[in-house]
Amino acid sequence: MSFKRLDPQDFLISADSVVGGMFSGEVTTLTTFFTSSTQTGTEYYRDVSDLITTNPSSEVQFAVSYGSKFGSGSAQFDTDIKGYSPSSVIYGQAQNIVIGDENNNFTFGGFTPTAQSIYVISFERARYKGNIFPGTLGLTLANGSTSITLTDNSKDVAVDTFNEAGRVYELVSGSNGSAVNASVTGQVANGMTSAGSYGLVLPDIGIIVLNGAALDLTTGANGGLNLSTGTDNNTNNENNKKLIDAIVEGASFKAQSQENITSDFVFVRARNGEFNYSENPSFISGSTGEVIYNEFINAPQTFLSSIGLYNDNNELLAVAKLSKPLKKDFTKEALIRVKLDF
């Protein structure tokens, strides 16, 4: 084993953007959705998996919650405290995460609905990795004979909008990051409804906030689904299931994840006069210290098989293995690139 100090120019740092399917197994489009009947805390959220939950290979893909500023759509914790319920808790949580101010209401496409009811789709952390890749979102919702396909409007905005949660895009009717054309029958301008956009997409935290007022609209020119959000008189806690049912019926949820992978490149150079002699004790006489085999005196050769990277304290930090041993002698030089991903 021989050592060589690396020079500053032997190091290079690079960052690459890697895009993959959002769902388990790098799948881009999910068409089947399952929830567990035994899940606890359904008044707050419901997990949605890619396979039936009794299947050992089933994995949670995202969770669906329903929130209301006024606590509608779920039973109150205390009948003496009006509006304090699981839906109000979810709304407050989304308010803090997305808006960053508990005193401000949600605004969708420049419109602030009076009802302030929302659905929240939060992707499992391992699914979206760094962020949701803008322009790849496609969520189909259906209720009976009516269906809509929603996407972010990332391709239609000249400048990105930012808030406490990072980038913010409007959720509009359309596909591949662009709103539908205003002339399309049954849609209003820019893929929005008379209650504003269908919601907000926050790619950097893996969350979609849907505008309950837009989804509650009756079918027709406004493009609503008539989900009747919050009409269960605060008793059934079924609003999150209403959205899940619409997702199941739509049977298509498309998205891709994106992450930046930083790589360190280390260039290890073995010049013609270096690393030609073996330091294996079997090549040297134990009594005289001479090279036992004469052919290794004037015409030595070695085979490089691995590279170890050490710090100044002589501590081994990483080992790189060559796919096959590399022959080295005085007539050859080698340049080996070591890539460290993290």
Image: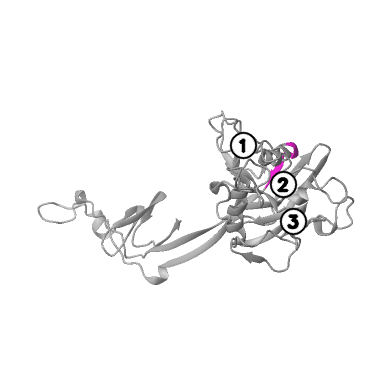
| Residue 89 position in % (x across, y down) | 59, 49
Residues in magenta, as a range: 249-254
Q: Nearer the viewer, residue 177 or 269?
A: 177
Residue 23 appears in view: no
- State if disc 3 and disc 2 touch (CB < 8 Å): no
Q: How far is disc 1 from disc 2 in space, using C-alphas?
A: 15 Å
**Residue 107, percent from left and from top:** 71, 60
Callout 3: SS? loop
Q: Secondary structure at mark 2?
A: strand
Residue labelled with disc 2: 139
Instruction: Tell which of 339 and 206 is nearer to you.
Output: 206
Which of these two is toward me, 158 or 115? 115
- Mark with earlier residue (1, 2): 1
Give neighbour class at mark 1: few <14, some 14-19, many 20+ (Cα, 10 Å): many
Mark seen at residue 331: none
Q: Is residue 252 magenta?
A: yes
Direction from residue 305 to residue 61 in the image, left or right: right
Closest to the camera, between mark 3 and mark 1, is 3
- Whether residue 319 is visible: yes
Which residue is rendered at x = 31% and y = 62% of the image? 311
Instruction: Return the residue at label 3.
Output: 114
* Circle 1 residue: 50
User: Which is closer to the viewer, label 2 or label 3?
Assistant: 3
Q: Residues within 10 Å of mark 3 (few under 14, many from 20)?
A: few
